[in-house]
Image (spheres, grey):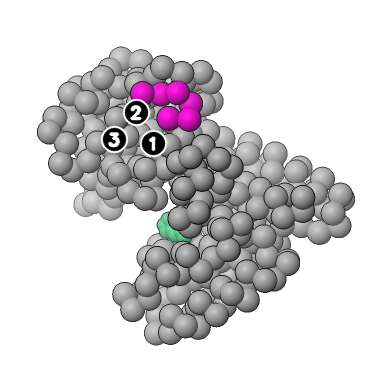
Amino acid sequence: MILIDGKKAAAELRAELKEEVAELKSKHNKVPGLTVILIGDLTPSQIYVRNKEKSANEVGLKSEVIKYPDSVEEKTVLEKIQELNSDETVSGILVQLPLPKHIDKQKVIEAIDPSKDVDGFHPMNVGNLSSGYESSIPCTPLGCYLLIKKIEPNLSGKKAVVVGRSNLNGKPMTQLLLKENCTVTITHSKTKDLKAECLEADIIVAAVGIPELVRGDWVKKDAIVIDVGINKTDNGIVGDVHFDEVSKNAKALTPVPGGVGPMTIACLLKNTINCFKRSQI
Ligand code: GUN
């Protein structure tokens, strides 16, 4: 079984991006800039944002974090986004989710200039991805896609099963696999026989948020299994895949942690650089 080392893959990607940033700097005499807006004091969000900032600095991006208290008015955030939209030194804007209840998430996402939307959540980018046009691609599915391609460069005709249909993961993952000519089945909580669907798959991407849902006998020999889950349990953090069981069957599997997670942040940096490059044309 191949244990897919997301930490190593992310470090390699960051090294490539660092070189690219240095080249862009010598060509344009400026570097791409990422601005993250963090609202409230949720611990996971604070940890994510700190890691994003650290990685952005490591590859040489200009990075800024704007923090607001939980009580900030929606209007203040929307005005800040407008300001960042017209700031030429800002290539990418990310508003860390989840947001406090009184702030309309969709309003915030739609306020971000699509050309600076490093999350790929703006409806314009969602539409462009599903139409096969150039767009920002949500970071987690992009990271999963790059890991899958490392194991299997030619995905044409492969059967892929995506478990979970969220806008963040399942839906964009489906679009990426479709673009590679996979035959994709999207499954979710109302799917009748999830085990039977998974048993058909050459590739399984589990992004449903249910601890250890995908069991050893759900997985075909030689399947590539990507685990997007991060679930807190009494036994610590586990994914959506039963690691011990599935590792006995699958051809390749991502661990949790150390699989998809590190790639997500590296892909955010990649998206920021891409936004910068498109803005320089
Ligand atoms: N919170 C958890 N994951 C993400 C993500 O990919 N983007 C944003 N903006 N917030 C998140």
Contact between marks 3 and 1 (CB within 8 A): the answer is yes
**Quarter where residue 223 is shown:** top left
Pick whichever of labels 2 and 1 is earlier in the sequence: 1
Task: Please report the bounds of the magenta region as a residue range.
Answer: 178-184
In the picture of the structure, the residue carrying the numbered disc 3 is 186
Vertical relation: 48 (above or below) 67: above
Vertical relation: 219 (above or below) 85: above
Q: Is residue 248 left or right of residue 50?
A: left
The image shows residue 203 at horizontal and vertical percentages of 36, 25
**Mark 3 nearby-residue class (10 Å; few <14, some 14–19, many ≥20):** some
The image shows residue 179 at horizontal and vertical percentages of 48, 30
The outermost residue toward the top is 221
- In the rendering, which numbered label is found on residue 184? 2
CA–CA distance in space, label 2 to label 1: 7 Å
The image shows residue 219 at horizontal and vertical percentages of 26, 22
Q: Is residue 179 magenta?
A: yes
Q: Is residue 105 magenta?
A: no
Q: Is mark 3 within 8 Å of ligand 1?
A: no
Contact between marks 2 and 3 (CB within 8 A): the answer is yes
Vertical relation: 11 (above or below) 195: below
Q: For the point 36% across and 23% down, which residue is it?
A: 183
The image shows residue 250 at horizontal and vertical percentages of 33, 21
Q: Is residue 170 left or right of residue 149?
A: left
Vertical relation: 120 (above or below) 164: below
Contact between marks 2 and 1 (CB within 8 A): the answer is yes
In the picture of the structure, the residue carrying the numbered disc 1 is 174
